[in-house]
Image: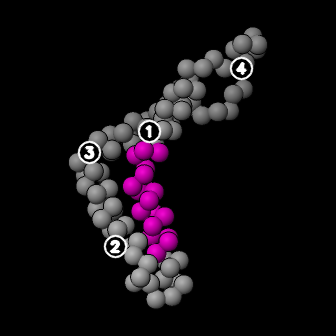
């Protein structure tokens, strides 16, 4: 049995459908723009007073980066799944 993710999985396809619907919305675009602006303010090392502030800012940047890159990462993952689904299964070739 093939354990790789596949878009033939109804729940996984539904997940991607919802994500692409979200990315197409004006609200998502505005949210990402605001996250990008906020990231510019967080990424000012000169304002940090100690190592705790540095680690806090790093955590903020990690989360903001995830938000900002989420659409791109989701689209790339979807493309990989589409390519995998287009390839024949190894079990199909062996006749099992």
Of mark 3 and mark 2, the one earlier in the sequence is: 3
Q: Identify the residue position indicated by label 2 in the image.
A: 41
Of mark 3 and mark 4, the one earlier in the sequence is: 3
How far apart, in angstroms, are the residues tagged by discs 3 and 4? 39 Å
Q: Position of residue 7 (x, y in %)?
A: 52, 29
How far apart, in angstroms, are the residues tagged by discs 2 and 4? 50 Å
Q: Is mark 1 on a helix, strand or loop?
A: helix
Q: Which residue is drawn at 40% across and 46% down?
A: 71
Q: What element carries label 3?
A: loop
Of mark 1 and mark 3, the one earlier in the sequence is: 3
Q: Is residue 65 part of the magenta span, yes or no?
A: yes
For marks 2 and 4, give the one nearer the viewer: 2
How far apart, in angstroms, are the residues tagged by discs 1 and 2? 28 Å
Of mark 1 and mark 4, the one earlier in the sequence is: 1
Residue 90: image tag? 4
The quadrant of the rendering that contains the N terminus is top right
């Amino acid at each position: 049995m093939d354990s790789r993710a596949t878009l033939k999985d109804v729940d996984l396809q539904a997940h991607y459908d919802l994500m692409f619907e979200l990315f197409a919305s004006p609200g998502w675009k505005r949210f990402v723009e605001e996250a990008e602006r906020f990231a510019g303010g967080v990424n000012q090392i000169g304002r940090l007073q100690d190592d705790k502030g540095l680690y806090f800012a790093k955590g903020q940047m990690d989360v903001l980066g995830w938000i900002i890159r989420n659409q791109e990462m989701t689209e790339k993952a979807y493309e990989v799944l589409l390519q995998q689904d287009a390839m024949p299964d190894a079990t199909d070739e062996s006749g099992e």
